[in-house]
Amino acid sequence: MSSARPASELLAMLAEHGLAATSQRLALLAAVLDAHGRHPSAEDLYRELSARFPTLSRATVYNNLAVLGNAGLIEKLETPEGSRFGPVAAPHVNLVCNACGAIADVLVGDPDLEALIRRATSAGSFTPRSVSLSVNGLCAACSQAQA
Amino acid sequence: MSSARPASELLAMLAEHGLAATSQRLALLAAVLDAHGRHPSAEDLYRELSARFPTLSRATVYNNLAVLGNAGLIEKLETPEGSRFGPVAAPHVNLVCNACGAIADVLVGDPDLEALIRRATSAGSFTPRSVSLSVNGLCAACSQAQA
DNA sequence: GTACATGCAAATTGTTTGCAAGTAT
DNA sequence: ATACTTGCAAACAATTTGCATGTAC
């Protein structure tokens, strides 16, 4: 179900922001965008890419996650289990499972949700930069396992 | 505007959860509950209480923040600037300023917000434990200062 | 008296920095 | 040719752990 993005598209994304297309950066961007709901941690990505780049440094991973994040190409999510990364998406709610760590995105682009966010920020003349809505708890599978 | 809570109430809160009322724990609970929107970090609290408890250990602060959090007496909020603590409140949206670190709570207990959360969790048969909604950006004051 | 809490120091984990060598544009 | 990127090692920050002593119940 998850078609990997064509390299040409990734190259265009980087070019658009004046970012050099090094193979590490390209692979990292692809890994985050194709993670398809896995929302990997920096360490996950480091391990995943280390197979293809044996000399890869954690510093490069962190550096590029920051660069891609600042460019608005990927999104950083703070969870009780640490920072997680994923594609940029329309406003949505993250359901974070505290047992297995899975993160599901729901109400993606929901109009009521967008209206509510607008209402929240205008209430305080707040200039929004990014939205991070999460509900922590147990996913369906883990809450069954508990019983 | 912010009346400190009577000690009797704090003692009752702890007793209700079978938690020993040590003076450090009591002071920490009071500090978090009376923070009134300041949403202090663990370090903030450590420094604040060190005045009264010169031998206070960070380990005690972290330990008690976890204990009080598990008991549902206080709330932990993950922000791009690290973990912050505050009173438990009705569902609300946190406006987190990335410049000055201030956190404002808006739409506290808003019915539309509550409805939306219900809709989000039921969508995935998710068992919610805690809700953490935040919008990162610039508060009114800091966004003026930028211009 | 017993179980839990504190304080200290050391260990861990996650992330950042300085700098020399390599690569994209 | 130049500026940006990588990789390594060391630095750093936030948080956790082990253990002996102290305190609430």
Image (cartoon, coloured by chain):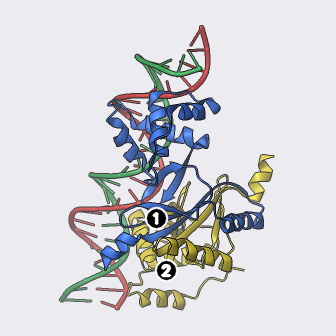
Chain colours: A blue, B yellow, C green, D red
- Callout 1 amino acid: Val
Residue under the image location 58 percent in, 65 percent down:
A107
Q: Secondary structure at mark 2?
A: loop
Q: Quadrant of residue B119?
A: bottom right
The chain letter under disc 1 is A
Q: Are marks 1 and 2 on the same chain?
A: no
Q: Nearer the viewer, residue C14 or A140?
A: A140
**Which residue is depicted at the point 38% across and 84% down?**
B20
Q: Position of residue B126 (x, y in %)?
A: 45, 73
Distance Cα–Cα, label 1 vs label 2: 21 Å
Residue B102 image offset from top left, x and y in percent = 66, 61
Is C16 above or below relative to B88? above
Q: Residue at x 32, y 31 (%)?
A: A54
Q: Nearer the viewer, residue C2 or A147?
A: A147
Q: Is residue A145 above or below residue A88?
A: below
Label 2: chain letter: B
Question: In the picture shown, does residue B126 fall above or below D1?
Answer: below
The x, y position of residue A90, in whole percent, is 62, 55
Image coords of residue A127 (percent x, y): 73, 55
Q: Amino acid at mark 2?
A: Leu
Q: How crowded is the residue under tag 1: few (<14 C-alpha within 10 Å), some, or many (20+)?
A: many
Q: Residues within 10 Å of mark 2 (few under 14, many from 20)?
A: many
Q: Residues at badges 1 and 2 in contact (C-beta under 8 Å)?
A: no
Left or right relative to A90: residue A104: left
The quarter of the image holding the N terminus of chain B is bottom right
**Residue under numbered circle 2:** B73
SS at circle 1? strand
Residue bearing the label numbered 1: A96
Report the mark closest to the observer, 1 or 2. Answer: 1
